[in-house]
Amino acid sequence: MIYSSTFIFAKKQFDDEFHRLDQAIAAAARALPGYLGEEAWENPATGLVSNVYYWSSLEALQALMSHPAHLRAKASQADWLAGYRVVIAQVMRAYGGGEIADGVVMFDAP
């Protein structure tokens, strides 16, 4: 099975600490067994940002959630974000055709 964790947020004010933690969380995710890839999107109309991580197990996702950098960022989120939502989902199907731009996560899902 494949799982996704989507972090949707509204920006407030970012500082150096935000950028350090954001990079640390991304590096931690990529280093975890079970990490499959990630994508990021921004909606210019609403200003919302969406970071999507893909995982081979819920245990891998849980490992990121309990990582010290993630816990520090979560404790300070009100300093940088005007609101957020997290969506954890099981990927039921993934398919497509044609060419897709570089950087898009590619994996096979049942």
Image (cartoon, rainbow, N blue to C red):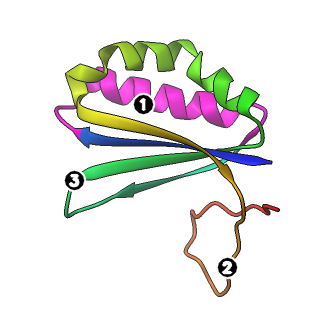
How many C-alpha atoms fall within 10 Å of the one at disc 1: few (<14), some, or many (≥20)? some
Quarter containing the C terminus = bottom right
Amino acid type, mark 1: Asp
Q: Left of 76 or right of it: where is 1?
A: right
Q: Amino acid at mark 3?
A: Gly
Q: Is residue 88 above or below residue 37?
A: above
Give the structural element (helix, strand or loop) at label 3.
Answer: loop
The span shown in magenta is: 11-35
Residue 22, which numbered label? 1
- Rounded to the nearest whole Å, what is the CA distance between mark 1 and mark 2? 30 Å
Determine the CA span between mark 3 and mark 2.
28 Å
Rendered position, 59 above or below 67: below
Measured Cα–Cα span from mark 3 to mark 1: 18 Å
In-front residue for pair 27/55 = 55
Is the residue under label 2 in contact with that under label 3 (CB below 8 Å)? Answer: no
Residue 75 visible in the picture: yes
Question: In the picture provided, is 100 more to the left or to the right than 18?
Answer: right
Q: Which residue is mark 2?
A: 96
Query: Which residue: 66% across, 31% down?
Result: 61
Is residue 33 toward the left or the right of residue 26 in the image? right
Tag 1 secondary structure: helix
Answer left or right for 30 relative to 43: right
